[in-house]
Structures are given as C-alpha cells and as structure tokens.
Amino acid sequence: MRQGMSDLRQPVIILVRPQMGENIGAAARAMLNFGLTRLRLVAPRDGWPNPRAVAMASGAAGRVLDQARVYPTLAEAMEGIDYAFATTARGRELTKPVFTPASAMEKARAHDGNCAIIFGPERAGLENEDVARANAIVTVPVNPEFASLNLAQAVLLMGYEWGRDHLPPEPAPHARRSDSDAPADRIEIERLGDRYEEGLEAAGFFFPETKAASMRLNLRNMWSRLSLTRGDVRILHGILRQLTRR
C-alpha cells in the first residue's frame, strides 16, 4: 500500500542565519509542495516575523511560517534532533559520510527518529562550525562549471527527493475539465467516420472500386486509433462542412 506523505515522520528544515525574508518565504513555499511543515530558523538577519517572507510564501504562510520556531544558535535549534544532514558543497575535510539528495532522503525515510536538513545562509552557505554539528553531508551533483543553487531551490530539491516515493504517480488535475476536453465516445467517432466516408464517396476518393473496401476499412481503423476529444470531433465536423459547401 502506498504510504501517504502525511503518514511519514517528516524531517525538520533548519535555515541557518537566512538573510532575506523573501528567501525564507520561498523556502516555505517549496517545503509545502512536498508536505513539509516543520521549519526552524536560526538567527534570521532581518528578525522575525518578517512580512516579506509572508508575502513570498503565499499559501504556505499559515501552515509553515506561522508554526516556525526561532533559535539564536544552531546548537539550540538541534533540540530533539537525533540525525542531521548538512547541505553543502564544502566541508569535505570533515570526516563525515557524504550523500546525494536521493540517498540522503532514502536514509531519512528509513530513520526511526527525528531528522533535520540544515541549510546555510544565501551568500556563503554553512560554515564548518555548522557542518560539524551534523551527522552527514548532502552535496548536490551539479554542473561543476556552475554550482549555484539558491536557498529555495535547494529546499525544493531536498523536499522532492524526500517525498517523491509518496507523490501521486500522475499530476493531479487542477480543475474539472470542460466538455470539449472530455474524450469523445465511440458513437461520436463512429458518426464522424460515417460523415467523412460519405463526403469522400461523393468526391470520388474510393477508387479504384477493387480497393474501395480496404480503403474504407483503413480509414475506419484510423479514426479508432486517434485519441479525439469532443472538441476535436466538433472541429473535424466543421472542417468537413465547410469543404463540402465549397
């Protein structure tokens, strides 16, 4: 049975010394796309709460930002955390296991406890003192000639890897589709085929007579292979109507 995202023990997202409210809001928005709601902030530069973060977060403000907890230091923000990943492209001089986002979140899903994912400030990322407080490092394998992810992109990437095994297999429809977008049923396609066959017969298309039967069969088979909507059928009827009028 597919486990829902809300059934998982989700990781805590910790933003260390974030510099701009807009980036905090964008990170919260990225989190909620994948069901993540546990946000901790360490010494945000512009204070907290921040109206710019709320404006950028859109619908994630109430569910993520309003519940965010603020701490003066990373050490205090690690309250209740028993395994933490530090996201950084540096810090490899520290003796720690290094994961990709996919392998890190696989470990997080299997962990029977409270995990955290730590993100550094926008300008310089995590310092070695921050990385030292994590159990492992997560490094994104990006283009070595341009390794530049912003804070929200990094959060989005980790959130996707955490939740992707529990996302819907197909994108969910945003709204009820119109009648024109609904698939045409077999009767509608049959009537369309009949009208085209009649029009082609009148135009002398089925020639020579010895091949007429196989041509009609191939044409009918073609209609059945097309994935037509009701709107498509109406357009094709209109095309034929205009052609036969002329």
Image (spheres, helix red, strand yellow):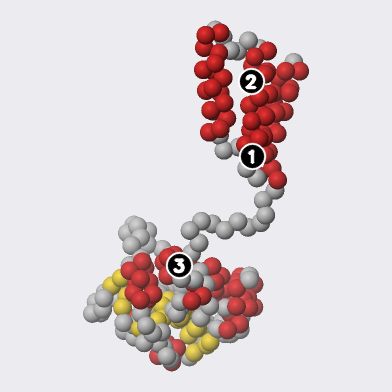
Contact flag, marks 1 and 3 (Cβ < 8 Å)? no
- Residue drawn at (33%, 62%) of the image: 141
Q: Which residue is mark 3?
A: 2
Q: Tag 2 or tag 1, which sits nearer the N-term? A: 1
Q: Quadrant of the N terminus?
A: bottom left
Q: Tag 2 or tag 3, which sits nearer the N-term? A: 3
**Residue 29, percent across and down?**
56, 70
Of residues 225 and 65, the one nearer the viewer is 225
Q: Which residue is mark 2?
A: 197
- Residue drawn at (41%, 81%) of the image: 116
> Label 2: few (<14), some or many (≥20) within 10 Å?
some
Of residues 211 and 76, the one nearer the viewer is 211
**Residue 120, percent across and down?**
42, 77
Contact flag, marks 3 and 2 (Cβ < 8 Å)? no
Secondary structure under tag 3 reads: loop
**Residue 64, percent across and down?**
57, 78
